[in-house]
Every structure is written in C-alpha cells, then in structure tokens.
Amino acid sequence: GDSVTQMEGPVTLSEEAFLTINCTYTATGYPSLFWYVQYPGEGLQLLLKATKADDKGSNKGFEATYRKETTSFHLEKGSVQVSDSAVYFCALSDAGGGSQGNLIFGKGTKLSVKP
Amino acid sequence: EAEVAQSPRYKITEKSQAVAFWCDPISGHATLYWYRQILGQGPELLVQFQDESVVDDSQLPKDRFSAERLKGVDSTLKIQPAELGDSAMYLCASSIGTVNTEAFFGQGTRLTVV
C-alpha cells in the first residue's frame, strides 16, 4: 500500500540556519503531496502542497518540490526562526491507489530552533 | 475563517467507561475524517465519511469504536469500553472532496484513559 517515510528527528538548529527535512513516498496512483505542521497541543495545519510532478509548493518561506523521478517531496527553508519550532508531517493523498483519497502521514519530524 | 470544531479538548476517563467525541466540519465539506494520533506518531485514519455514508472504516476497531454522521454534517466518535491503549489525540478533519484535496483539521481531543 501507499506509504510516506520522513527523516527521523528531532532536528535542532540555530536561528537563521538552513532547514531540510527529507520525505519520500510510495504510491500506486498519482498522489498529491502535502506538508502539515503541528504546534504543541494543537491540530495539524496545512503548510504547503503540490498536486503533480515538478510542482513547487511554498508558504511562509518553506518550499517543497514534487519529484516523481525520486519519489520525494523534501521540505526546505533558507532561514529558520524560533517560531518554526514544531512537528512537521509529510503526507500524501492518492485516490487512485485503492484508498478513498484520505491522507497517509509520515511519522513526523520534530524541529527545535534555538535563539 | 471557517474552522473544524471539536469537543471536548481534553477528556480523562477510566478504563471500561464509555467516551464520545464530537466534530463539526467546515460548512459545505462533504468529506469528514476521524484520525487517531498516538504520541510521537503521525495520524492514522480511523474512519472516513462522504456525506452521511462511511466510505472507509477498515482501520476502525469495530468491537469498541463506532462513528456516525447521521445528517451528513456533524459527527460523533464513540469508544465503549475504553482501554488504556486508547489514550491518544483524536483528530477530526474535513475536505470539500476526496480526490487529492487538502484536509482541514480541528484542534483535536486529547484522551487519557486511566
């Protein structure tokens, strides 16, 4: 079945450092890809998405490019801030993969940014 | 801005008791999901509704869990009896459709079974 694998955390960075969180996926159909962010004690918020190969999603300085050839959707930010500290989830939605289009999540990567 | 509403935010219950969670999706969203998130893990789907119909409950432990969305709007998830292993965050989400569309999440209900 479909699955998402993302890098293990926690990731600890200093403010203004460059961030990369790796995400790869397995899907039988043509999925849409998402990054969600979860702040402590809260639900998930959509950070960005891409619906087809070579699309780049971007929001709040974060970017991710849908790479079909490497089945990847890595999250990047050029200069992180303390307020970016959260757990980041990579996810896919694949209505053509035998599911009903529901989101399949990775295990999450906790990011801590120090001042 | 429209939000997915969930209640309660926190619930502590004793094992073998019944517990229920409520979700009100964004108006006009036909698809509603219930996810369970164990601490330190990603959310996992329990049940998915399209309007009032269940379209996926393959991961729902049906011996103790039930879910309904009688009028195709708000939804209730019930656990009876609760077990210690049910302690988790229960997240409700909604979306306009099912074909690769983004889902909007509520703040979740944190359940602790003691």
Image (cartoon, coloured by chain):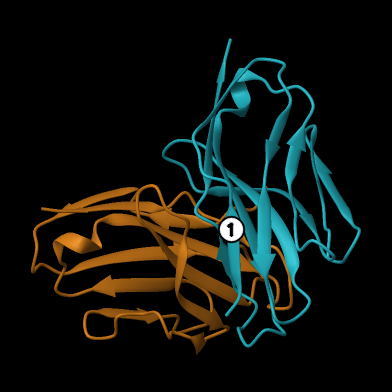
Chain colours: A cyan, B orange
Residue farthest front in this picture: A70
Q: Which residue is mark 1?
A: A5
Q: Chain of mark 1?
A: A
Residue shown at 68% from the left, 78% from the top: B98
B55 to B107, vertically: above or below: below
Q: In this rendering, would A3 be left or right of A54?
A: left
Badge 1: few (under 14), some or many (20 or more) residues near its Cα, within 10 Å?
some
Residue farthest top in this picture: A115
User: Amino acid under label 1?
Assistant: Thr
Q: Position of residue B21 (x, y in %)?
A: 33, 64
Q: Position of residue A104 (x, y in %)?
A: 57, 67
A17 to B114, vertically: above or below: above
Q: Quadrant of residue B84?
A: bottom left
Camera-side residue: A45 or A54?
Answer: A54
Q: Position of residue B88 (x, y in %)?
A: 31, 55
* Numbered disc 1: secondary structure: strand
Residue shown at 66% from the left, 20% from the top: A81
Camera-side residue: A4 or B29?
Answer: A4
B23 to B64, vertically: above or below: above
Residue shown at 60% from the left, 74% from the top: A102
Q: Quadrant of residue A77?
A: top right
Q: How many marks?
A: 1
Q: Position of residue A61 (x, y in %)?
A: 80, 32
Q: In this rendering, would A18 be left or right of A53?
A: left
Residue shown at 61% from the left, 23% from the top: A83
